[in-house]
Image (cartoon, helix red, strand yellow):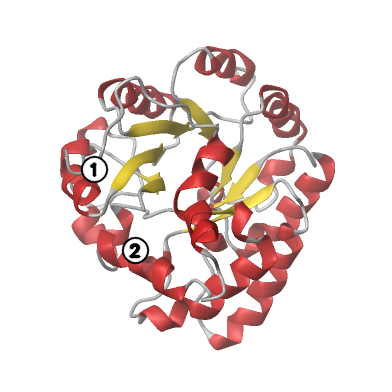
Protein backbone atom coordinates (compact mmCIF):
# COMPACT_ATOMS: atom_id res chain seq x y z
CA UNK A 1 0.00 0.00 0.00
CA UNK A 2 1.36 3.40 -1.00
CA UNK A 3 1.12 6.06 1.71
CA UNK A 4 0.52 9.79 1.52
CA UNK A 5 2.11 11.57 4.47
CA UNK A 6 -0.32 14.39 5.26
CA UNK A 7 1.96 16.23 7.70
CA UNK A 8 5.68 16.96 7.42
CA UNK A 9 7.98 19.98 7.55
CA UNK A 10 11.20 21.42 6.16
CA UNK A 11 13.23 24.30 7.54
CA UNK A 12 16.51 26.17 7.23
CA UNK A 13 17.71 27.86 10.39
CA UNK A 14 19.41 30.68 8.47
CA UNK A 15 15.98 31.91 7.38
CA UNK A 16 15.56 33.33 10.90
CA UNK A 17 11.79 32.98 11.18
CA UNK A 18 11.63 29.78 13.28
CA UNK A 19 11.53 31.42 16.71
CA UNK A 20 10.54 28.17 18.43
CA UNK A 21 13.65 26.40 17.10
CA UNK A 22 16.26 26.99 19.80
CA UNK A 23 19.37 25.03 20.75
CA UNK A 24 17.53 23.26 23.57
CA UNK A 25 15.44 21.52 20.89
CA UNK A 26 18.31 19.07 20.40
CA UNK A 27 18.08 17.06 17.18
CA UNK A 28 15.58 19.51 15.71
CA UNK A 29 18.05 22.41 15.85
CA UNK A 30 19.46 21.86 12.38
CA UNK A 31 18.35 22.18 8.77
CA UNK A 32 15.91 19.63 7.34
CA UNK A 33 15.55 19.56 3.58
CA UNK A 34 13.85 17.38 0.94
CA UNK A 35 17.08 15.48 0.43
CA UNK A 36 17.06 14.49 4.12
CA UNK A 37 13.54 13.06 3.86
CA UNK A 38 13.89 11.24 0.55
CA UNK A 39 15.47 8.03 1.94
CA UNK A 40 12.52 7.56 4.31
CA UNK A 41 10.03 8.09 1.50
CA UNK A 42 11.72 5.42 -0.57
CA UNK A 43 12.07 2.96 2.32
CA UNK A 44 8.45 3.22 3.47
CA UNK A 45 6.61 3.49 0.13
CA UNK A 46 5.51 7.10 0.60
CA UNK A 47 4.10 8.23 -2.73
CA UNK A 48 3.93 11.89 -1.71
CA UNK A 49 3.59 14.34 1.14
CA UNK A 50 1.74 17.44 2.32
CA UNK A 51 4.29 20.02 3.44
CA UNK A 52 3.07 22.09 6.41
CA UNK A 53 4.31 25.50 7.55
CA UNK A 54 6.54 25.71 10.62
CA UNK A 55 6.99 29.49 10.88
CA UNK A 56 4.32 32.19 11.19
CA UNK A 57 5.56 34.18 8.20
CA UNK A 58 4.32 34.83 4.70
CA UNK A 59 7.90 34.49 3.49
CA UNK A 60 8.18 30.91 4.71
CA UNK A 61 5.04 30.01 2.79
CA UNK A 62 6.63 31.37 -0.38
CA UNK A 63 9.74 29.31 0.42
CA UNK A 64 7.64 26.15 0.76
CA UNK A 65 5.92 26.89 -2.54
CA UNK A 66 9.35 27.11 -4.18
CA UNK A 67 10.04 23.57 -2.90
CA UNK A 68 6.70 22.41 -4.31
CA UNK A 69 7.83 23.57 -7.73
CA UNK A 70 11.04 21.54 -7.47
CA UNK A 71 9.90 18.24 -5.97
CA UNK A 72 7.11 16.26 -7.61
CA UNK A 73 6.48 14.20 -4.47
CA UNK A 74 5.43 17.30 -2.53
CA UNK A 75 1.73 17.10 -3.35
CA UNK A 76 0.63 20.29 -1.60
CA UNK A 77 1.52 23.13 0.78
CA UNK A 78 -0.31 24.11 3.96
CA UNK A 79 0.92 27.67 4.37
CA UNK A 80 0.51 30.57 6.78
CA UNK A 81 -1.14 33.95 6.55
CA UNK A 82 -2.00 36.36 9.36
CA UNK A 83 -5.73 35.89 9.71
CA UNK A 84 -5.98 39.10 11.75
CA UNK A 85 -4.29 41.26 9.11
CA UNK A 86 -6.06 43.74 6.81
CA UNK A 87 -3.72 42.44 4.10
CA UNK A 88 -5.12 38.90 4.37
CA UNK A 89 -7.59 39.12 1.44
CA UNK A 90 -4.92 40.38 -0.97
CA UNK A 91 -2.35 37.80 0.16
CA UNK A 92 -4.90 34.99 0.00
CA UNK A 93 -5.86 36.03 -3.53
CA UNK A 94 -2.20 35.83 -4.53
CA UNK A 95 -1.72 32.38 -2.95
CA UNK A 96 -4.86 31.00 -4.56
CA UNK A 97 -3.34 31.83 -7.95
CA UNK A 98 -0.24 29.74 -7.15
CA UNK A 99 -0.06 26.04 -7.84
CA UNK A 100 0.39 23.95 -4.72
CA UNK A 101 -1.41 25.79 -1.92
CA UNK A 102 -3.91 23.35 -0.34
CA UNK A 103 -4.55 24.87 3.10
CA UNK A 104 -3.54 27.36 5.77
CA UNK A 105 -2.47 26.91 9.38
CA UNK A 106 -2.44 29.56 12.12
CA UNK A 107 -0.10 28.49 14.93
CA UNK A 108 -2.77 28.79 17.61
CA UNK A 109 -0.78 26.88 20.23
CA UNK A 110 1.77 29.72 20.26
CA UNK A 111 -0.79 32.54 20.56
CA UNK A 112 -1.39 33.68 24.12
CA UNK A 113 -5.12 34.43 23.77
CA UNK A 114 -7.14 31.21 23.71
CA UNK A 115 -10.00 32.90 21.82
CA UNK A 116 -7.81 34.75 19.30
CA UNK A 117 -9.54 32.98 16.43
CA UNK A 118 -12.92 34.48 17.41
CA UNK A 119 -11.91 38.07 16.62
CA UNK A 120 -14.26 39.81 14.22
CA UNK A 121 -11.57 40.38 11.57
CA UNK A 122 -10.37 36.77 11.83
CA UNK A 123 -13.91 35.48 11.35
CA UNK A 124 -14.32 37.77 8.35
CA UNK A 125 -11.11 36.45 6.80
CA UNK A 126 -12.04 32.84 7.55
CA UNK A 127 -15.19 33.39 5.51
CA UNK A 128 -12.88 33.93 2.55
CA UNK A 129 -11.44 30.46 3.15
CA UNK A 130 -14.97 29.07 2.99
CA UNK A 131 -15.69 30.87 -0.28
CA UNK A 132 -12.41 29.57 -1.73
CA UNK A 133 -13.00 26.06 -0.30
CA UNK A 134 -9.56 26.19 1.31
CA UNK A 135 -9.27 24.19 4.55
CA UNK A 136 -7.66 25.12 7.84
CA UNK A 137 -5.20 23.04 9.87
CA UNK A 138 -5.74 23.50 13.61
CA UNK A 139 -2.63 23.34 15.81
CA UNK A 140 -4.44 23.34 19.13
CA UNK A 141 -4.49 21.99 22.68
CA UNK A 142 -7.27 21.49 25.21
CA UNK A 143 -7.43 25.19 26.09
CA UNK A 144 -8.59 26.03 22.55
CA UNK A 145 -11.51 23.59 22.35
CA UNK A 146 -14.27 25.99 23.54
CA UNK A 147 -13.18 28.64 21.04
CA UNK A 148 -12.98 26.14 18.17
CA UNK A 149 -16.44 24.86 19.07
CA UNK A 150 -17.76 28.45 18.99
CA UNK A 151 -15.96 29.08 15.68
CA UNK A 152 -17.53 26.06 14.02
CA UNK A 153 -20.97 27.07 15.24
CA UNK A 154 -20.43 30.38 13.43
CA UNK A 155 -18.82 28.82 10.32
CA UNK A 156 -20.19 25.27 9.97
CA UNK A 157 -19.03 24.97 6.35
CA UNK A 158 -15.39 25.79 7.18
CA UNK A 159 -13.34 22.65 6.50
CA UNK A 160 -10.80 21.97 9.24
CA UNK A 161 -8.43 19.22 10.31
CA UNK A 162 -7.14 18.82 13.86
CA UNK A 163 -3.38 18.33 13.94
CA UNK A 164 -1.83 15.76 16.31
CA UNK A 165 -5.21 14.75 17.85
CA UNK A 166 -5.18 18.14 19.66
CA UNK A 167 -1.94 17.31 21.52
CA UNK A 168 -3.34 15.71 24.68
CA UNK A 169 -1.30 15.00 27.79
CA UNK A 170 -0.98 11.22 27.59
CA UNK A 171 -2.20 10.02 30.98
CA UNK A 172 -5.10 8.07 32.44
CA UNK A 173 -6.21 11.12 34.40
CA UNK A 174 -6.46 13.37 31.33
CA UNK A 175 -7.93 10.83 28.90
CA UNK A 176 -11.62 11.31 29.81
CA UNK A 177 -11.52 15.08 29.27
CA UNK A 178 -9.70 14.65 25.96
CA UNK A 179 -12.36 12.16 24.78
CA UNK A 180 -15.07 14.69 25.56
CA UNK A 181 -13.17 17.37 23.64
CA UNK A 182 -12.81 15.15 20.58
CA UNK A 183 -16.47 14.17 20.68
CA UNK A 184 -17.38 17.85 20.78
CA UNK A 185 -15.38 18.57 17.62
CA UNK A 186 -16.27 15.35 15.80
CA UNK A 187 -19.97 16.32 15.83
CA UNK A 188 -19.18 18.80 13.04
CA UNK A 189 -19.13 16.88 9.74
CA UNK A 190 -16.48 19.19 8.22
CA UNK A 191 -13.97 18.47 11.01
CA UNK A 192 -11.31 15.84 10.27
CA UNK A 193 -8.40 14.64 12.42
CA UNK A 194 -4.75 13.73 11.84
CA UNK A 195 -3.24 10.68 13.48
CA UNK A 196 0.12 12.36 13.90
CA UNK A 197 2.57 13.73 16.43
CA UNK A 198 2.26 10.87 18.93
CA UNK A 199 5.91 10.41 19.88
CA UNK A 200 6.24 13.94 21.22
CA UNK A 201 3.13 13.71 23.42
CA UNK A 202 5.03 11.92 26.19
CA UNK A 203 8.59 12.02 27.54
CA UNK A 204 8.75 8.22 27.32
CA UNK A 205 6.29 5.97 25.54
CA UNK A 206 5.36 2.53 24.31
CA UNK A 207 3.22 2.02 21.23
CA UNK A 208 0.39 0.61 23.37
CA UNK A 209 0.16 3.93 25.25
CA UNK A 210 -1.55 5.38 22.20
CA UNK A 211 -4.01 2.54 21.55
CA UNK A 212 -6.98 4.10 23.39
CA UNK A 213 -6.39 7.46 21.70
CA UNK A 214 -6.31 6.02 18.20
CA UNK A 215 -9.30 3.77 18.86
CA UNK A 216 -11.32 6.72 20.10
CA UNK A 217 -10.44 8.88 17.10
CA UNK A 218 -11.65 6.07 14.83
CA UNK A 219 -14.89 5.77 16.82
CA UNK A 220 -15.48 9.54 16.88
CA UNK A 221 -14.54 10.48 13.32
CA UNK A 222 -14.83 7.24 11.37
CA UNK A 223 -12.27 6.03 8.87
CA UNK A 224 -13.40 8.57 6.25
CA UNK A 225 -12.33 11.65 8.28
CA UNK A 226 -8.88 10.57 9.51
CA UNK A 227 -5.47 11.25 7.93
CA UNK A 228 -2.05 9.78 8.67
CA UNK A 229 0.86 12.17 9.21
CA UNK A 230 4.44 11.49 10.26
CA UNK A 231 5.17 14.97 11.67
CA UNK A 232 8.72 14.54 10.36
CA UNK A 233 11.21 15.86 11.41
CA UNK A 234 9.54 16.83 14.71
CA UNK A 235 8.88 13.11 15.28
CA UNK A 236 12.66 12.56 15.49
CA UNK A 237 12.62 14.20 18.92
CA UNK A 238 10.78 11.13 20.21
CA UNK A 239 11.46 8.35 17.75
CA UNK A 240 11.79 7.65 14.03
CA UNK A 241 9.84 7.97 10.80
CA UNK A 242 9.26 4.21 10.83
CA UNK A 243 7.86 4.33 14.36
CA UNK A 244 5.50 7.13 13.34
CA UNK A 245 3.99 4.77 10.78
CA UNK A 246 4.00 1.74 13.09
CA UNK A 247 2.23 3.52 15.95
CA UNK A 248 -0.74 4.21 13.70
CA UNK A 249 -0.66 0.98 11.70
CA UNK A 250 -0.41 -1.33 14.72
CA UNK A 251 -2.92 0.57 16.85
CA UNK A 252 -5.76 0.82 14.34
CA UNK A 253 -8.70 -1.38 15.36
CA UNK A 254 -8.56 -4.90 13.91
CA UNK A 255 -12.14 -4.42 12.74
CA UNK A 256 -11.05 -1.95 10.05
CA UNK A 257 -11.05 -3.35 6.53
CA UNK A 258 -8.20 -3.00 4.07
CA UNK A 259 -10.06 -0.27 2.22
CA UNK A 260 -10.66 1.66 5.46
CA UNK A 261 -6.96 1.52 6.29
CA UNK A 262 -6.21 2.75 2.77
CA UNK A 263 -8.52 5.69 3.41
CA UNK A 264 -6.53 6.67 6.48
CA UNK A 265 -3.10 6.20 4.93
CA UNK A 266 -3.76 7.63 1.49
CA UNK A 267 -7.21 8.40 0.11
CA UNK A 268 -8.37 10.84 2.78
CA UNK A 269 -5.35 13.11 2.28
CA UNK A 270 -6.23 13.35 -1.42
CA UNK A 271 -9.86 14.07 -0.59
CA UNK A 272 -9.40 16.60 2.21
CA UNK A 273 -6.67 18.63 0.54
CA UNK A 274 -8.02 18.07 -2.99
CA UNK A 275 -4.57 16.96 -4.09
CA UNK A 276 -4.00 16.95 -7.82
CA UNK A 277 -1.73 14.52 -9.62
CA UNK A 278 1.67 16.00 -10.39
CA UNK A 279 2.81 16.06 -14.01
CA UNK A 280 5.78 13.80 -13.18
CA UNK A 281 4.62 11.54 -10.40
CA UNK A 282 7.21 10.34 -7.91
CA UNK A 283 7.12 6.59 -7.25
CA UNK A 284 8.80 5.19 -4.14
CA UNK A 285 11.93 3.22 -4.88
CA UNK A 286 12.64 4.80 -8.26
Res 92 → quadrant: top right
Q: Is residue 51 above or below residue 108?
A: above
Residue 4 locus on image (x, y percent): 40, 46
Give the residue at the far bottom of this rendering: 172
Q: Secondary structure at mark 2?
A: helix
Q: Residue at x 43, y 31 (%)?
A: 76
Do callouts 1 and 2 mark residues in contact (Cβ within 8 Å)?
no
Quarter in which the C terminus is drawn:
top left
What's the CA distance linking mark 1 and mark 2? 18 Å
Q: Is residue 215 above or below residue 62?
A: below
Q: Nearer the viewer, residue 173 or 137?
A: 137
Along the polypeptide, which appears first: circle 1 or circle 2? 2
Q: Secondary structure at mark 1?
A: loop
Q: Nearer the viewer, residue 269 or 120?
A: 269
Q: Identify residue for label 1.
A: 284
Q: Nearer the viewer, residue 108 or 268?
A: 268
Q: Is residue 116 above or below residue 202?
A: above
Q: Is residue 196 left or right of residue 214?
A: left
Residue 192 locus on image (x, y percent): 63, 51
Q: Identify residue for label 2.
A: 244
Q: Residue at x 68, y 76 (%)?
A: 177
Q: Is residue 278 above or below residue 107?
A: above
Res 285 → quadrant: top left
Give the residue at the far front of this rendering: 258
Crowd class of label 2 (few under 14; some 14 to 19; many from 20; radius 10 Å): many
Crowd class of label 1 (few under 14; some 14 to 19; many from 20; radius 10 Å): some
Tally of marks:
2
Q: Nearer the viewer, residue 255 or 248?
A: 255
Residue 105 appears in the picture as rendered = no
Residue 233 appears in the picture as rendered = yes
Give the residue at the far right of this rendering: 153
Residue 43 locus on image (x, y percent): 19, 53
Amino acid sequence: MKIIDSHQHFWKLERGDYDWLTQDRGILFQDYTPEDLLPSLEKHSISGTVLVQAAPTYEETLYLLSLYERYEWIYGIVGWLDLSSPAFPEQLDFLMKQQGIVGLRPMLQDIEKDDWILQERVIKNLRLLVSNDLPLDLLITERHIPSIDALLEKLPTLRVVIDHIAKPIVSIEEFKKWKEDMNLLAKFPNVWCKLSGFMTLADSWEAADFTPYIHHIVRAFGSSRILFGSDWPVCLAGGSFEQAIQIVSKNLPNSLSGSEREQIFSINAKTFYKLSERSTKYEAGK
